[in-house]
Amino acid sequence: MRINKLKFMLIALVGLTSLAGYLNGGTSKAAAAGDVNPHWRGTESFSLTNAGPNVVRCGAFPENIELSFSGSGIDTEGGLFNVTASACTNTISNRIFDLKATDTYVQSGDQLLIEADSFVQVIDQTNCVASNSHAVMGRVAGGTGNLAGATGNARFHFANNITPCNGQNAPAHVWFEGVVMRP
């Protein structure tokens, strides 16, 4: 519901900006601004590539560690992409924080930079799964190429295997929906 209100407000803002440019008899930077993708959706899977201390970014070790991931996905903004991501995690509380990802689109080479709010993973020891209990809010924090200066927001959902629980090393999965605005 919250995202629907946000989408409506975003579309209304773009419409009002366009109308203002028309009424002024000229074009404004906002009216001439690029595209809005109000239906940005996608999914990705990625695997852990590194884990270790990073006291400057994450805080005291061994309670806090930095995790790095790489993988691939697909979305409605640029199609197939490769993703690299990193985050800090508190090994006692299961809190994930300072999550940053870079999606590099295979066809164009353009990149989308994404940051997510902190969240706590809920651990299901019976099924060896960790997931978020509610949507994790995130934002588009720029990009490169045709996505330079991009903004937007999204709701992310995470699910991953807990390797120490079952001994299996399986990729984590993310799915999301949101809005991307290109200047």
Image (spheres, rainbow, N blue to C red):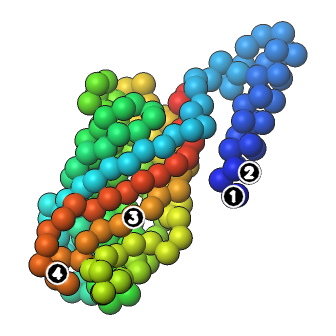
The amino acid type found where label 2 is placed reads Lys
Mark 1–mark 4 distance (CA, rounded to whole Å): 37 Å
Image height check: is 121 above or below 26?
below
Left or right side of 73 for 97: right
Left or right side of 153 for 60: left
Left or right side of 24 for 133: left
Instruction: Determine which of the numbered discs, if any, sits on residue 54 in the image.
Output: none
Q: Upstream in the sequence, badge 2 or badge 3?
A: 2
Quick one: SS at disc 3?
strand
Who's the residue at 35% across and 40% down the image? 74
Mark 4–mark 2 distance (CA, rounded to whole Å): 41 Å
Which mark's residue is nearer the viewer, 4 or 2? 4
Q: Position of residue 23 (x, y in %)?
A: 87, 16
Q: Quadrant of the C terminus?
A: top right
Q: Are marks 3 and 1 in contact (CB under 8 Å)?
A: no
Disc 3 designates what residue?
158
Disc 4 designates what residue?
166
Mark 2–mark 1 distance (CA, rounded to whole Å): 5 Å
Q: Are marks 2 and 1 in contact (CB under 8 Å)?
A: yes
Q: Judge the density around disc 4: few (<14), some (14-19), many (≥20) Cα neighbours within 10 Å.
A: few
Q: Upstream in the sequence, badge 3 or badge 1?
A: 1
Q: Judge the density around disc 1: few (<14), some (14-19), many (≥20) Cα neighbours within 10 Å.
A: few
The amino acid type found where label 3 is placed reads Phe
Quarter assignment of residue 38: top right
Instruction: Determine which of the numbered discs, if any, sits on residue 5 in the image.
Output: 2
Quarter assignment of residue 110: top left
Mark 3–mark 4 distance (CA, rounded to whole Å): 19 Å
Q: Position of residue 32 (x, y in %)?
A: 65, 18
The amino acid type found where label 1 is placed reads Arg
Mark 2–mark 3 distance (CA, rounded to whole Å): 23 Å
Q: Position of residue 62 (x, y in %)?
A: 21, 86
